[in-house]
Amino acid sequence: MYDGDVHPGEAHLPEWAKARVQTGGYLEERVMNRIVMSFVVLAASLPAFSHHSNSAYRVTEVISLTGTVQEWRWVNPHTWLFVVVEDENGEQQEWALEGRAPGILARAGWNPEVFQPGETVMVYGSPAKDGSAEAIIARVTKADGTILGNSPDYFSGAEGPVAPTVASTGTTPDFSGVYYPYRPDGGGGMGAGTATPSDGSPPPPPARSAPISDGSLGRLPHEPKLTPEYMAMWEVITESLIAGSYEYDNSHNCLPPGMPSMMAMPYGMEVMQNDRKITFFGEHLDALRRVYLDEREPSERVLNDPTYAGYSTGRWEGDTLVVDTVALTTKSYITGKTPHSDRMTIRERIRFTEPDILENRITVNDPVALTEPWEVVYRYRKASYPDDELREFACAEGLRDSPVHQ
């Protein structure tokens, strides 16, 4: 566990940032109040669902349902397919089946007219934890044999101009463009794909419908290492998610993903750049952040008004953009559902490592919540026409027009 006035990773921060992270303020009282209130809430009855996230389902359990389409809703934050299924007693039962957001499914071959009332479909999905007639979709097979998975294909194969990898002309690199997650090994998919065996037979049933996000696997080796106090907070959050509550689920509540989570970029991201600032716009929840390059420093007013994206300033070190972020609200998470204190700071080193591949090396420092700095590397691949278009993610649409549990 690191301690002292300046912890590892703070040594190279600007002076204003060092001063900020060395003042704890009201943290201790706030943390204790949050822990106490968390246990009180868990003792009460859980709130009714309005729309779902992965944590509401048993995502490693997959069932199959065959039925008739009643309605198909192409809406944010999650699509919905309503199917009437005949149970073992011959009774008709309507199932509400949640799909991923339109921005993801459109890249997996879905569209607003992909299902029509009256057609027969076979759906693989994971059932809701509360036992209701609801599930999250892993894969759908239409009557004509069309198979629809929920993993997006971000690139259509179109070629575009190659981005510079170094500032060889003495100018800074231009990061402008639209990017998607880059995983050279092809891993890390969002759910069940549609790969068909070489002999033409149907693909095997999916093993799961979505990533496990409720903490039921415990703390994983790659996750930030928490101090006992913040581990207790994480356990409260996990208990709530496993029980099916959305109290601590920011995505469900249409709140921004925050930093550094938004840079994990599960969907797409657009980078807009000029001499004074770089703007990152994430497609997931329409998350926005700005990095100022004009040597400005955050005012005391800014530092006393923390936000999900925080306040970011950057400078160029050759071909690398170095970004420091402070003033981050404790309502956000480091990654997943990992809590942090108001002393968290973030350092990023962003550069092209090869043509069109952008790398972001992130170091998170928090002397109160973490026993050591947490490091992670994200990589993004630049898109070309026609793949360089992001879709609106109007999360409040689903809150207003929730199709279940009104």
Image (cartoon, helix red, strand yellow):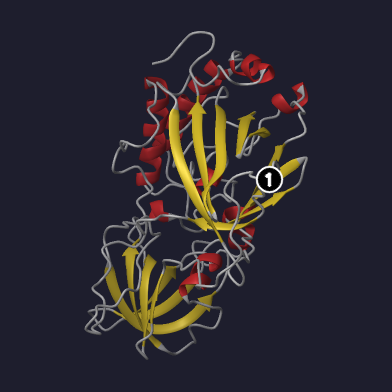
Q: Position of residue 405 (x, y in %)?
A: 49, 61
Q: Position of residue 87 (x, y in %)?
A: 27, 78
Q: What residue is pinned by disc 1?
A: 169
Query: Which amino acid type corresponds to the residue marked 1 in the rendered image?
Result: Thr
> Is 326 drawn above or below residue 379 in the view shown?
above
Residue 302 seen from this side? yes
Looking at the rendering, in which quadrant would you find the C terminus?
bottom right
Secondary structure at badge 1 equals loop
> Is 72 drawn above or below residue 98 in the view shown?
below
Residue under the image location 24 percent in, 78 percent down: 197
Crowd around label 1: few <14 · some 14–19 · many ≥20 (10 Å): few
Identify the image quadrant of residue 151: bottom left
Residue 304 seen from this side? no
Q: Considering depth in this image, is 365 or 11 the residue closer to the camera? A: 11
Q: Considering depth in this image, is 395 or 301 the residue closer to the camera? A: 301
Residue under the image location 43 percent in, 38 percent down: 44
> Is 154 drawn above or below residue 266 in the view shown?
below
Residue under the image location 55 percent in, 26 percent down: 344
Q: Considering depth in this image, is 201 or 382 the residue closer to the camera? A: 382
Question: Looking at this rendering, what residue extends furthest in the top direction?
Answer: 4
Residue under the image location 46 percent in, 57 percent down: 52
Counting labels gives 1
> Is 193 drawn above or below residue 345 in the view shown?
below
Q: Position of residue 371 (x, y in %)?
A: 40, 21
Question: Looking at this rendering, what residue extends furthest in the front direction?
Answer: 169
Instruction: Specify whether 66 is left or right of 80.
Output: left
